[in-house]
Amino acid sequence: MALNRFQVFGKDFSWTVNKPTKSTYKISCLIWTLAFVAAMLPFMGWGSYVFESDGLSCTFDFFTRTAPIRSYIIFMAVTLYISPVVLITTCYIFITVKVYIFEKKHFKPGGLVRFKGKKILYFEKSVARITVITIGIFLLSWTPYCFVALIGQFGDASLITPLVSILPGFFAKSSTAFNAVIYVCLHSKLRKTRNHTNNSIELIGIPVLLNTIHQNQYPPIGEQASEIWSHHSKL
């Protein structure tokens, strides 16, 4: 997302934002390819997976201090954490400077700006705000996990208790669910859709369903359920 915003702000706000560009697809493919390769490497002998202390999930081994394990930890830290942080920081420094220059040039006291320019600038700043919050949650989620892995490999491993090893992993894996919440809460169009959907459910969907259940004393099934859900989906 930072790269996408970087490209957008580099075009002087003169583009249209109706469809993703080819570069967006290329960046997405690159990210997924890198993630897939990094996840598959332990199965090929570089690094390894172990159960976490709760025994319910697995993670990469960051306690065994051998050359393959250590090099894999370094690779993961540099490639999947440090490099993205540096890239994100660089992109947003550029974006901040670009917005400052644009506002200084077009929003002079007493001056007029075309509506299109103001609209695009507002849109870009809104999207940038969402992206910054998303990246902030990424940093808060994955920084403890990265530090725990590095301490386990290079520091005093006795500091990593079962609880200390579980919590960073829990927050890191939960970060993927936070993105949807952020977009729904902050994106204006998604927020309007959410409100409309909630109103439809509260005013129409739930009473219809509860009334049917009350009359029949059991949840609707079969054709009856299909009719109810079909009616609700049309609303």
Image (cartoon, rainbow, N blue to C red):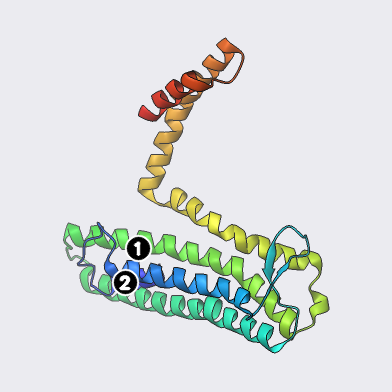
- The residue that mark 2 highlights is 99
Q: Residue 91 in the image: state x and y as whole percent.
A: 39, 76
Q: Residue 66 in the image: state x and y as whole percent.
A: 73, 87
Identified at 38% across, 40% down, the residue is 193
Is residue 235 in view from this perspective?
no
Q: Secondary structure at mark 2?
A: helix
Q: Secondary structure at mark 1?
A: helix
- Residue farthest top in this picture: 215
Q: Are marks 1 and 2 in contact (CB under 8 Å)?
A: yes
Identified at 22% across, 74% down, the residue is 105
Mark nearer the N terminus (1 vs 2)? 2
**Residue 77 vertical position relative to residue 182 in the rendered view, above or below:** below
How far apart are labels 1 and 2 at the CA level?
Answer: 8 Å
Q: Report whether 6 appears left or right of 112.
A: right
- The residue that mark 1 highlights is 125
Identified at 74% across, 68% down, the residue is 165
Q: Classify residue 148 by image quadrant.
A: bottom right
Numbered label attached to residue 199: none
Q: Residue 232 in the image: state x and y as whole percent.
A: 42, 26
Q: Nearer the viewer, residue 32 or 119?
A: 32
**Residue 18 vertical position relative to residue 13 in the rendered view, above or below:** above
Amino acid carrying mark 2 in the image:
Val
